[in-house]
Amino acid sequence: MRRETAFGPTPTREPTVAPPTHNNMIGKTLLSTGRSAAVRSLHTTAPARLATEAPAAKAPLVKAFEIYRWDPENPQEKPRLQTYKVDLNQCGPMVLDAIIKIKNEIDPTLTFRRSCREGICGSCAMNINGGNTLACLSRIERTSTPLKIYPLPHTYVVKDLVPDLTNFYRQYKSIEPYLKQKTPMPERENLQTIADRAKLDGLYECILCACCSTSCPSYWWNSDKYLGPAVLMQAYRWMIDSRDQFGAERRHALQDPFSVYRCHTIMNCARTCPKGLNPGLAIAEIKKLMAADA
């Protein structure tokens, strides 16, 4: 390049670049090598490898669910067991999870009750492998052995796994399950001592799922007259409540050969209760109170 000046054009020097030296070459090589190693180290650490590696697919674990089916719209068809196969590796751990999966993905006509999925509402009570329990609390055994599911035994069936509990709730209503007092209502709360409150433990937790009543042979035979374990336990719960003033009247209403005395302490109720309660003990306490009244 040439540059014009007041004295005419003068030559200018081209910028020169120093030739690479041995030391410069070594430095650049080390720098590039260090950067490459750093990048590789970011991608070869254990967490990175775990994040990029695809998880190994589990082998299917198929279990057969034999479920009671009956449709009142087709009365000519007899009740039957229908088999559904479910991969347990693609399903939740509880029986209710499997039933919901069957309804959502295999057979939308399957009918059952469910609500809270936490063992609180009692809606999903059914007979699973021969025992009454809640489907949401019953864990699936991870084996290939078939699982049989029926509605609660000795009840009229509305459809599939839905029992008719009309008589059960009518009996519950008959015991008047609420506080009854002869004195005027207090201005504020109905107070209760800690000791009196402790007497209700093991009684008030009942969720009225009917597992105990429908497992009781006495209730199977006399469900029209015998109140059954669940209802009687709730009757006792109100009899011993220190705030209730109708205990004697409540016991008098049960003074007949069937309401209480059909209990023969078979104790299926205590064995099957999904909440771990003991209705048989409550019934025995009612009998003691009634004997004292006589």
Image (cartoon, grey):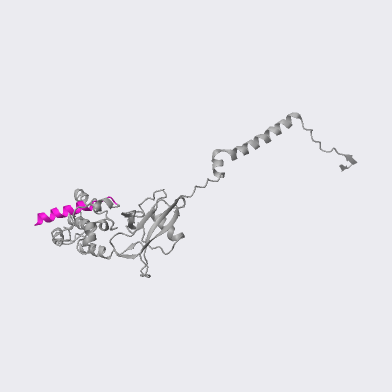
Position of residue 32 measured from the top left corner of the image (x, y, whole percent): 68, 36
Name which quarter of the figure residue 235 lies in: bottom left
Position of residue 160 measured from the top left corner of the image (x, y, whole percent): 36, 63
- Please give the name of the residue rendered at 23% of the width and 59% of the height, measured from the top-left corner: 219
Q: Nearer the viewer, residue 23 or 247?
A: 247
Position of residue 213 measured from the top left corner of the image (x, y, whole percent): 25, 58
Q: Is residue 281 magenta?
A: yes
Q: Is residue 293 magenta?
A: yes
* Total count of labels: 0
Is residue 73 placed above or below 26 in the rendered structure?
below
- Please give the name of the residue rendered at 24% of the width and 60% of the height, measured from the top-left corner: 220
Please give left or right for residue 144 compared with residue 227 in the image: right
Name which quarter of the figure residue 64 lies in: bottom left
Please give left or right for residue 14 compared with residue 233 in the image: right
The quadrant of the image that shows the C terminus is bottom left
Position of residue 47 measured from the top left corner of the image (x, y, whole percent): 54, 40
Q: Nearer the viewer, residue 254 or 67?
A: 67
Name which quarter of the figure residue 41 lies in: top right
Which residues fall within the magenta stretch?
Answer: 275-294
Report whether residue 221 is seen: yes
How would you classify the magenta stretch by its main secondary structure? helix
The quadrant of the image that shows the N terminus is top right
Report whether residue 228 is seen: no
Please give left or right for residue 285 compared with residue 133 in the image: left
Residue furthest to the right in view is 8
Residue furthest to the top in view is 23
